[in-house]
Amino acid sequence: MEVKKHKGSEEMSNNEGVIYRISGPVVTATGIDARMYEVVRVGHEKLMGEVIEIHGEQSVIQVYEDTSGIRPGEPVFSTGQTLSVQLGPGLLTQIYDGIQRPLQTLEEVMGVFITRGVDADGLDLEKKWEFEATASVGDEVSGGQVIGTVQETDTITHKIMVPPKASGKIKSLESGEFNVTQTVCTLDDGTEIQMMQEWPVRHPRPFNQKYAPDTPLVTGMRILDFLFPLAKGGAAGIPGPFGSGKTVTQQSLAKYSDAQIVVYIGCGERGNEMTEVLDEFPHLIDPNTGKPLMNRTVMIANTSNMPVAAREASVYTGITIAEYFRDQGYDVALMADSTSRWAEAMREISSRLEEMPGEEGYPAYLSSRLAEFYERAGRVETLNGDDGSVTVIGAVSPPGGDISEPVSQGTLRIVKVFWGLDAGLARQRHFPAINWLNSYSLYPQSLNQWFRDNIASDFPEVRTEISALLKVEAELQEIVQLVGSDALPMDQQLTLEVARMIRVYFLQQNGFDPVDAYSGVEQQYAMARAILTFQEEAKKAMAAGAVLEDVVNVPARIELMRARFAEGYLEKIEGLVEEMVNQIGNSVEAQ
């Protein structure tokens, strides 16, 4: 893959201006006839930038690279292009920066520090791919239709599509080895189709229609799937303070969710945290295929010390790549970690533009930008009639964990799932530290039918009972703190024990345990039913004269809770529950 250092203006158009003013990453140029969101090259080093405001003769540019050392009077060149990404075979397994430059390629050429004014193609333009045509000469095709496939990785087949705006009758089409810039198909109007497409990142890719969400994204995390489910094509926010487990939760979702493609955007994260992610991800094994997880992953790494404007672009780069795989009929999970850093980049650029600040200094258009991003999620009918989805999960890092700040509130107004991380739970070593009392999901009603059809007919009722027990426990805890649990009636003491069982046995989950890290929905239902069975049997036994302590301490109940760390737990639950019921019955006879 070639790395290009801009030295002359041979690649630029004749449209040239000069730098008039510089304020950090925001540069004002005069004498250039540019359009909004056009990509320009700034200074002698040809730094990449994008026009974000036009005032008469003056064009305001946000530069995606460090501007130190450039000065007024240096040239600015127009490219006539908008900020676009290259889409085609070779995206998977890549690690990009915020403007789709492959970091591994840049490192090979210049070491660990990226030199300014450097370009690298998002795809390897020289690598040959085995293209297998699936359409035929004479077929009438339109935008989005699949004309062939490439086996990109062991697990993912890349579908080569007609660009969205092209249509016609196929004049020529051949299978064979091609690179992404060679023509594989010609239409009767002379349109040549390559395996690579380019798409402007700020424009959503087209589709036929958006479906109502009716299928859950199965994550393998009990508290999420069971109590606060997320639909495929939905959007979720994970606000939480420092150290509460946002990144670990997102990594677990990336590894275990039933999405076929993962796009992970490390947007403004700390360098050491991003390094950990980049070191760890290539070694993770996909539990579904046994192959490396990177085979179906695209990563965008834009750390907090990288240029602030590129951070703002990284989110759009990621969602455009996700939409491209959605158009091939895949279910894509996009993790944005974290949207707070993205908002901070907008705030910094806005202040340099001298715009009127909104709440806490954020720009007045913060909410509309957040909405633009999250609204690109959805389960759709693609242009070729397939079903595909993009599910967006955005982490939010509110200062001091205060979710009343603008980014958290702007996110909560848009997303339908709120997984609220709690520093108090994290300090108690309860992970995932998602607070079940203030989290919510607005999807259960639309997903209930799926759970009834695929898991159990009484699944929604079991979920409601578990939620109710947790709420009752929260109310009882206030009394317990005043008078102690011994002062409560026996039935309320039992409720506290059952709720503790829900918390310790069901809601706590070890993300680093090879067995407990993933829990299928069938297993989640079986575990919840086991808890409710314990409650029913304990009530009967205590009504017949059994002592609460004897009922709670039956060996089978303790084994039921411990055994979830062993392989094949789902097959064992039924037998353990039967044994528990017998032992609770025996505790009555022992009185």
Image: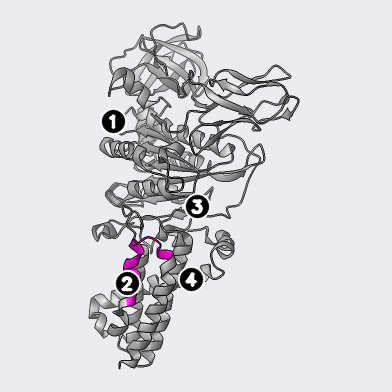
How dense is the environment of label 1, judged by Cα within 10 Å: few (below 14), some, or many (20 and up)?
A: few
* Mark 4 vs mark 2, CA separation in Å: 22 Å
Type of secondary structure dominating the magenta stretch: helix
Residue 112 at what x, y percent from top left? 27, 24
Q: To which residue does mark 4 refer?
A: 462
Distance between mark 4 and mark 3 Cα atoms? 19 Å
Q: Classify residue 114 as left or right of residue 256.
A: left
Q: Which residue is mark 1?
A: 305
Q: Earlier in the sequence, mark 4 or mark 3?
A: 3
The amino acid type, in three-letter code, at marker 3 is Leu
Q: Amino acid at mark 2?
A: Glu
- In what element is the residue under mark 1? loop
Q: Position of residue 351 (x, y in %)?
A: 35, 31
Between 165 and 48, the one lying in front of the other is: 165
Placement of 94 over or under 524, stated as above or below: above
How many numbered marks does the figure carry? 4
**Residue at 44 percent of width and 59 percent of height:** 440
Residue numbers of the magenta segment: 556-570
How busy is the neighbourhood of tag 2: few (under 14 within 10 Å), some, or many (20 plus)?
some
Which residue is denoted by mark 3 in the rendering? 217
